[in-house]
């Protein structure tokens, strides 16, 4: 049968209904609502019977029941019993999309195709009921939840709805139940590119209801109070012709002929510069959006069926589901975290230092914990500069409307700065942000320990130094814990919590509770050089440096790392974290493991320069600055490495290091290493972190003759 002629009614969906035996079914109940005009609207409510912490999801059994419900209202519409159909959700939630636990149970490409086709059959029927259909988006609408709305004739949204999005590309999929065809034809190609591709790739950004309305995804927006009553009255107006629905962003002929292909071309170029060409889902989504400018809806749905089948059956989706599970479950229940009842209550925080990092800490602590925060430094000028920065940042949040005036003033009042260290006396949790040198950190902690209470906790933000060594001169080393943030502090979701042989359960428990209070995910690591993320990034950066000093042009080195799928190349990453920091981390790793980590003294000369690399508009590193070229002159070899050699070296180096970290018990399990890399280094979901990728690429077998996962995490293939 040719594309565009799929007869969903003739397909046997029983194979996927059978594998969904333990699905939490979202039921679809119907009640008739008589509108003011006398017309009758059959209102379907989706509800899985759980509280709002368990959103409605759309698995095979749910879709089958919804299909039967829709068939029933279609028959009633044909009989003249009803004049419209509405669909809404339980309180706060329409639906959070497909039941992903069911998708991971599929065992063949044919079953994967059935998932796509069942969604199209059921949700697609909302536009074919014989009467207008209205989606009343009363809360969370993600993926298939939003596609329920898109397949309806009209849509309203509750102004307080938590989030509206098509996040599929983030998970290695595409909007496969109508979204890729319907959305660009509703709101235009540029807006659709933002919702379908850009937002998912920006840490899964979502739309607020007002944004969804402004884009034209929603036809009307109403406040939470009386939302359903207002929506029903509006629907009555539409049915009576009293309310005219205008679709201001619906694409016309000129957009389809001219703007559409240009927008696709620009988006492809942006994707290639930002994420390389390894991820499949953004490019398949791009192709679907491109083809949506012409042809029939049936053809669009058939294309979605095939694209979704390819992705669901592939390695990248399997890895994404592994990563998704880590972030959704493991990150929320940190392995090794002591009982939270052991934690000391934190009523005041002390921060040693008033530089940029210390000021970022202070801003985060005061915003999230809303307790007094004290910063100190060697002289009042530095302290004043730090406090001024914090006040300025609070002011910016106020201007953006993220804080009201009272809240902003309260936060400013909670931050104090001084050179008088005696004010640390009533701090419960003190963290240092001073120069990355053991002696300096020992000295400041030595001073503070004499001032603070016996049960106060000390935390070091060291990126690679030994926490035990930092605490070696303390009278109470058991109170010290590693508390390693990642830059930028406000954005990066990971904190590595480092336990020394002396660290008490109370100190450790306090660190985990504080991390959670800051809105961060914490992973427990042993006190090993570089902990997890920096140890592995040092391997990546070291191999990049090795290739350059052999004579490989910097742009070619960056390109060679593309298949890793990292958000940026190694030199772009070094430029972001800072060349001095990178050189320091590299030194630490070389000092401990000289046989495994690459060192070159010229790297330090580069680290002293303000400008090291040239970059293009997309942020990609294209070469060295003149100052850097002078440093490198005469120090670069004439035996450039091939892209294949560079990639194999970094793969094997990572596999070796991860295996050693597990043998050394730096973390409990390989899942913790992958979680750290996903949250702390932006390692892509489509790799699943590093270990599934290294298994698939054969690096694990090459290095230690086995795999990290048995069986390796792979798609279902053919």
Image (spheres, rainbow, N blue to C red):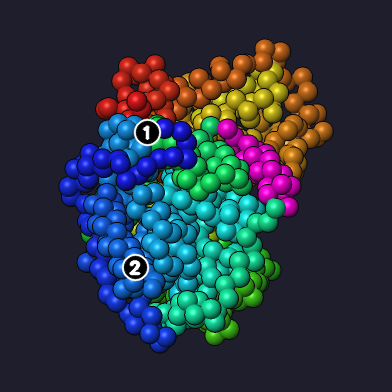
x and y percentages locating residue 591 in the rendered image: 50, 30
In this view, the residue in front, 676 or 78, is: 78
In this view, the residue in front, 349 or 269, is: 269
Please name the predominant secondary structure of the magenta segment in the image.
Answer: helix
| Residue 587 visible, this orientation | no
x and y percentages locating residue 608 in the rendered image: 71, 39
> What secondary structure is marked by label 1?
loop
Residue with the mark numbered 2? 77
Residue 410 as seen in the image, left or right of residue 551:
left
Numbered badge on residue 227: none
Residue with the mark numbered 1? 313
x and y percentages locating residue 94 in the rendered image: 37, 65
Residue 494 as seen in the image, left or right of residue 358:
left
Q: Residue at x 37, y 42 (%)?
A: 7
Quadrant containing the C terminus in the rendered view: top left
Up-down: is 629 above or below 132?
above
Q: Residue at x 52, y 68 (%)?
A: 218
* Magenta residues (range): 254-277
Tell which residue pokes out farthest to the top in this image. 639
Quadrant containing the N terminus in the rendered view: top left
Discs 1/2, front: 2
In this view, the residue in front, 88 or 684, is: 88
Badge 2: residue crowd in 10 Å (few <14, some 14–19, many ≥20) = many
Tell which residue pokes out farthest to the front in this image. 79
Residue 645 as seen in the image, left or right of residue 172:
right
Q: Residue at x 46, y 33 (%)?
A: 2
Q: Residue at x 27, y 49 (%)?
A: 60
Tell which residue pokes out farthest to the bottom in this image. 36
Q: Is 287 within the magenta?
A: no
Q: Are marks 1 and 2 in contact (CB under 8 Å)?
A: no
Q: Residue 415 is drawn in which quadrant?
A: bottom right
């Amino acid at each position: 049968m040719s594309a565009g002629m799929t007869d969903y009614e003739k397909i046997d969906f029983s194979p996927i209904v059978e594998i969904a035996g333990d699905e939490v079914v979202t039921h679809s109940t119907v009640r008739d609502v008589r509108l003011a005009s006398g017309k009758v609207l059959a209102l379907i409510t989706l509800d899985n019977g759980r509280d709002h912490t368990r959103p409605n999801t759309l698995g095979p059994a749910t879709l089958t029941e919804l299909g039967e419900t829709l068939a029933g209202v279609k028959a009633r519409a044909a009989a003249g019993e009803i004049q419209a159909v509405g669909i809404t959700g339980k309180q706060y939630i329409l639906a959070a999309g497909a039941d992903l636990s069911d998708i991971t149970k599929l065992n063949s490409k044919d079953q994967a195709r059935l998932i796509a086709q069942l969604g199209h059959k059921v949700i697609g029927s909302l536009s074919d009921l014989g009467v207008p259909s209205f989606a009343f988006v009363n809360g969370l609408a993600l993926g298939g939840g939003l596609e329920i709305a898109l397949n309806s004739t009209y849509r309203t949204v509750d102004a307080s709805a938590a989030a509206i999005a098509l996040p599929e590309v983030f998970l290695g999929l595409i909007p496969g139940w109508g979204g890729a065809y319907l959305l660009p034809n509703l709101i235009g190609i540029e807006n659709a590119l933002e919702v379908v591709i850009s937002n998912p790739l920006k840490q899964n950004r979502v739309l607020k209801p007002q944004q969804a309305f402004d884009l034209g995804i929603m036809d009307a927006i109403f406040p939470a109070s009386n939302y359903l009553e207002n929506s029903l009255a509006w629907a009555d107006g539409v049915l009576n012709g009293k309310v005219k629905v205008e679709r201001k962003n619906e694409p016309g002929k000129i957009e389809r002929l001219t703007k559409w292909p240009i927008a696709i071309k620009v988006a492809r170029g942006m994707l290639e510069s930002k994420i390389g060409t390894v991820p499949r889902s953004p490019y398949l989504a791009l192709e679907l959006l491109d083809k949506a400018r012409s042809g029939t809806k049936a053809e669009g749905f058939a294309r979605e069926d095939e694209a979704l089948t390819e992705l669901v059956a592939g390695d990248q989706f399997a890895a994404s589901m592994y990563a998704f599970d880590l972030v959704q479950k493991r990150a929320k229940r940190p392995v090794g975290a002591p009982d939270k009842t052991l934690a000391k209550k934190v009523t005041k925080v002390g921060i040693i230092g008033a530089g940029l990092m210390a000021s970022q800490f202070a801003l985060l602590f005061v915003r999230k914990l809303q307790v007094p925060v004290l910063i100190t430094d060697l002289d009042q000028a530095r302290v004043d500069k730090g406090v001024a920065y914090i006040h300025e940042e609070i002011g910016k949040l106020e201007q953006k409307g993220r804080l009201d005036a009272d809240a902003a003033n309260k936060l400013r009042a909670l931050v104090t700065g001084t050179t008088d260290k005696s004010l640390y006396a009533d701090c419960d949790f003190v963290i240092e942000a001073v120069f990355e040198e053991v002696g300096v950190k020992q000295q400041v902690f030595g001073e503070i320990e004499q001032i603070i209470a016996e049960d106060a906790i000390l935390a070091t933000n060291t990126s690679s130094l030994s926490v035990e060594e930092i605490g070696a001169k303390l009278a109470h080393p058991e109170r010290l814990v590693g508390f390693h943030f990642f830059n930028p502090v406000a954005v990066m979701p990971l904190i590595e919590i480092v336990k020394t042989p002396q660290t008490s359960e109370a100190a450790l428990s306090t660190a985990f509770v504080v991390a959670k209070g800051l809105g961060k995910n914490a992973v427990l690591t042993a006190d090993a050089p570089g902990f997890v993320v920096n140890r592995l990034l040092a391997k990546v950066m070291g191999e990049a440096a090795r290739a350059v000093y052999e004579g490989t042009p910097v742009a070619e080195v960056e390109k060679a790392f593309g298949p890793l799928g990292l958000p940026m190349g190694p030199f772009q990453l070094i430029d972001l974290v800072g060349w001095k920091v990178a050189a320091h981390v590299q030194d630490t790793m070389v000092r401990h493991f000289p046989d495994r980590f690459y060192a070159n003294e010229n790297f330090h000369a580069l680290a002293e320069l303000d400008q090291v690399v040239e970059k293009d508009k997309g942020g990609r590193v294209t070469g060295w600055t003149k100052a850097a070229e002078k440093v490198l002159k005469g120090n670069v070899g004439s035996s450039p490495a091939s892209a294949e050699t560079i990639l194999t070296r970094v793969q094997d180096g990572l596999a070796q290091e991860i295996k050693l970290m597990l043998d050394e018990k730096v973390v409990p399990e390989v899942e913790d290493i992958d979680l750290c890399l996903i949250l702390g280094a932006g390692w892509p979901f489509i790799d699943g972190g590093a270990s599934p990728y290294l298994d698939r690429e054969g690096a694990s077998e090459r290095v230690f003759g086995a795999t990290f996962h048995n069986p390796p995490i792979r798609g279902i293939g053919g």
